[in-house]
Amino acid sequence: MGRPVSDALQVTVLGSSGSFASIDNPCTGYLLRSSGAAVLLDCGPGVLGPLQRVIDPAALTAVVITHCHPDHWIELPVLRNVFMFFHPVERMPVYGTARTREMDEAVTVMSPQQTDPIDWTVIDSSSTLRIGDQHWAFSRTDHPVETLAVRVDVGSASFAFTSDTGPGWSVGELGAGIDLAFCEASHLSSQEGRGIPHSSARQAGEAARSAGVARLVLTHLMPGSDPAAHLAEAAKTFGRAVSLAEPGTTFGI
């Protein structure tokens, strides 16, 4: 599964750009590695390249997709081709919402003689998963389509990812004791109140502080954003320093 995992859980940023890829940042995708599993969380456009820098795709344990918006899953059909023709895998568990599965099936082209290596399981906010030594739980966020925030626990280490959400949902819905949270901060507070179904950096910091999150990482910034402004705004409401989900960065718990 790539390099040895020295922490209970390591989260590597493959891509974190919001809605569309920036020049040097693919859309959403993270690799979660522990001693017993390597899971790809979201599979947005462009993540397959960075994924191969850190792990053979065939060595993945599973793939989890948070929702059906293309910037979070559309690389999955390409990953299917990798498993079928280049790095053969007989069965790769994939977990995602019902609508994501429908969309994936709609764009999948295979002959009757071929067997799909993607083994789909539909999940919702009530689902829990045991993937190797990783325990996964979900919560539906404030977004126009069914979108699942995730909490992953490995022993006493806990990680949360908000996926996409407006201010009507908070990372605190995933429970207490979160060591590391990746919270979307698509825009700044100047854009609040305009009906945008995403969170601002200010809101991300405030929600993480209220939830007692130990470390906050901002993600899903729109291309062209000023990262320093997002970090400053979130740090002010969070109460301490905040990090950015930069491609290639690994966070350990």
Image (cartoon, rainbow, N blue to C red):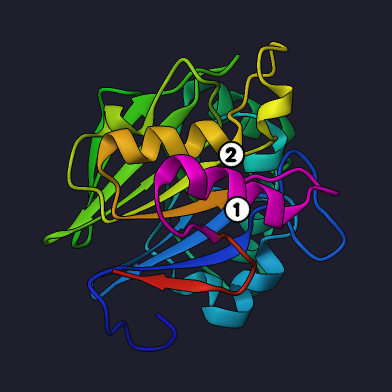
Dividing the picture into quadrants, the one containing residue 34 is: bottom left
Taking depth in this image into account, of 93 and 85 the one nearest to the observer is 93
Q: Which mark is residue 117?
A: none
Q: Quadrant of the N terminus?
A: bottom left
What SS does tag 2 mark? helix
Name the residue rendered at 62%, 54% in the picture.
80
Residue type (three-letter) at the residue carrying disc 2: Ala
Is 117 magenta? The answer is no
Name the residue rendered at 42%, 20% in the picture.
169
What SS does tag 1 mark? helix
Dividing the picture into quadrants, the one containing residue 212 is: top left
Whether pointer 2 and pointer 1 mark residues with C-beta atoms closer than 8 Å, the reply is: yes
Give coordinates of residue 152: x percent, y percent: 28, 50
Dividing the picture into quadrants, the one containing residue 133 is: bottom left
The outermost residue toward the left is 155
Name the residue rendered at 73%, 24% in the picture.
191
Judge whether residue 73 can be spotted in this image.
no
Is 227 magenta? The answer is yes
Give coordinates of residue 44: x percent, y percent: 67, 48
- Residue range corresponding to the magenta coloring: 220-243
Taking depth in this image into account, of 92 and 250 the one nearest to the observer is 250
Give coordinates of residue 238: x percent, y percent: 42, 44
| C-alpha span from label 2 to label 1 | 7 Å
Which tag, 2 or 1, sits closer to the chain's start?
2
Residue at the disc numbered 2: 201
Residue at the disc numbered 1: 231
Judge whether residue 147 can be spotted in this image.
yes
Dot 2 surroundings within 10 Å: few (below 14), some, or many (20 or more)?
many
Dot 1 surroundings within 10 Å: few (below 14), some, or many (20 or more)?
many
